[in-house]
Image: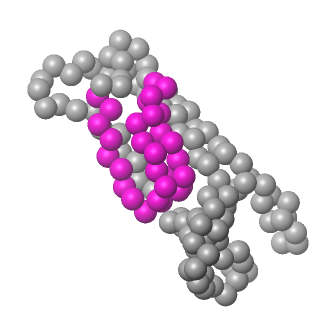
Amino acid sequence: MGFNELKCQWVGEKSWSYRVELPMVPTVTEEGTQHVLALDGLDTFANVKVNGVVVLESDNMWVMHRVNVTSKLHADRTNLLEIEFRPALPAAKGTKDAYPEHRWVGFNGDMSRLAVRKVRLVLTA
């Protein structure tokens, strides 16, 4: 307990990257065959790259994405998936500030958190 939460809040204020090598895929020879990247619940502001090419920009954690990456994959070597997660708080503050006429209603914390489509952290004792 204590003030440990305050000591680690910096984690949510930084960008974070996830990188993983994907296995080699067979060359698509049959018409209509696709390699699809399934992304469910990306934590809110994320750019997704396959082999250095942006294939998706996401700003809503509640949207499931299916991205055809067939043309981005190399059949002769491993492939690199990269996801850059940007911090939600600066984007939320920007959205809140852009709509000063809107009445942001909440009972605790920074009201700008209401401006993003992101899971809420609930702490219990």
Going 47% across and 39% down the picture, which residue do you hit? 48
- Image quarter hosting the N terminus: bottom right
| Towards the viewer: 111 or 43 | 111
| Towards the viewer: 24 or 51 | 51
Q: Is residue 118 visible?
A: yes
The percent position of residue 111, horizontal first and vertical second, equals 66, 76
Q: Is residue 109 magenta?
A: no
The percent position of residue 35, horizontal first and vertical second, equals 28, 33
Left or right, 63 with reference to 125: left
The quarter of the picture where residue 3 lies is bottom right
The percent position of residue 57, horizontal first and vertical second, equals 46, 45
The percent position of residue 71, horizontal first and vertical second, equals 30, 25
The range drawn in magenta is: 42-70
Going 59% across and 66% down the picture, which residue do you hit? 98
Going 78% across and 60% down the picture, which residue do you hit? 9
Which residue extends farthest top? 76
Color encoding of the figure: one colour
Left or right, 14 with reference to 103: right
| Towards the viewer: 76 or 14 | 14
Total tally of numbered discs in the picture: 0
Which residue extends farthest right? 2
Q: Does residue 7 sit above or below 100 in this rendering? A: above
Q: Does residue 74 sit above or below 39 in this rendering? A: above
Q: Is residue 66 magenta?
A: yes
- Image quarter hosting the C terminus: bottom right
